[in-house]
Amino acid sequence: MTGSSTGSASSRRFPSKYSTAEGGLVTAQQWLAEFMTARQAAKTGVTLERGFWLRRPAWEKTLCHQLRHAATLLRLVPLEAVGAVLRGPQGRFIFSLANQKLLALCREEARQLELKKAAAAALERLAEPTPPQAEDLPLAPRPSSKPALGKKRGSLDKLEGG
């Protein structure tokens, strides 16, 4: 599975906590890099401010490192899987997008997401009304057959009215 199967994750924009512009939007790659850089900063007790990479060269290096790994990761797995893993209990202690355990977890999460989507699509198809099949249609009663020409009608035929 590739990251391109997520639709337009590369064209979507996400709100940035650290953009130099108020209410700035960033790409998925930038958002993931900011997220992991902020996680590393919090671990070391550092508070990052808007545009931190312009004033803090060490954190600029960390952000660039995470940007490169975010691009690679998003080519391999969908953004939804990465986000689910990083917010879940297994991803709480992952501090770099280069972590190989993260890639394995994201691939498994992507597989689970695909299974859920397939199950939802199958349920949706089951909920749709289907046209009746030929064997489901009620059979119309056959018209009573008339006696063939030249055949003499018996007394029972006269009683049935046919």
Image: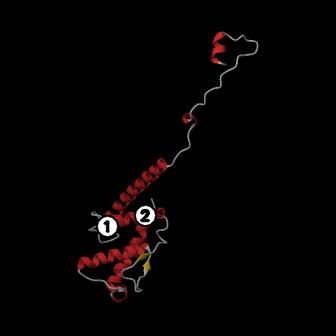
Q: How far across and down, in percent of the image, does residue 104 sit? A: 34, 60
- Name the image quarter holding residue 116: bottom left
Q: Residue at x 63, y 15 (%)?
A: 159
Crowd band around label 1 with a 10 angstrom C-alpha radius: few (<14), some (14–19), many (20+): few
Q: Position of residue 82 (x, y in %)?
A: 37, 65
Specify the label residue 87 is tagged with: 1
- Give the Cα separation between the discs numbered 1 and 2: 19 Å
Viewer-nearest residue: 59 or 129? 129
Looking at the figure, which quarter contains the N terminus? bottom left
**Neighbours of disc 2 within 10 Å: few (<14), some (14-19), many (20+):** some
Q: Position of residue 160 (x, y in %)?
A: 63, 17
Mark toward the start of the polypeptide (1 vs 2): 2
Q: Position of residue 74 (x, y in %)?
A: 42, 67
- Height in image: 132 above or below 120? above
**Image position of 113 with respect to 56: above or below:** above
Q: Tell me what residue is drawn at x 23 percent, y 80 percent.
A: 45
Residue 71 position by quadrant: bottom left
* Foreground label between 1 and 2: 1
Judged from this view, the residue extending furthest toward the right is 150
Q: Is residue 85 left or right of residue 154?
A: left
Point out the image quarter for the C terminus.
top right
| Tag 2: amino acid | Leu
SS at circle 2: helix
- Kind of element beneath mark 1: helix
Residue topped by disc 2: 76
149 on left or right of 41: right
Q: Quadrant of residue 77?
A: bottom left
Identity, as a three-letter code, of the amino acid under mark 1: Arg
- Residue drawn at x 39%, y 71% as measured from the top left: 69
Circle number at residue 64: none
104 relative to 153, above or below: below
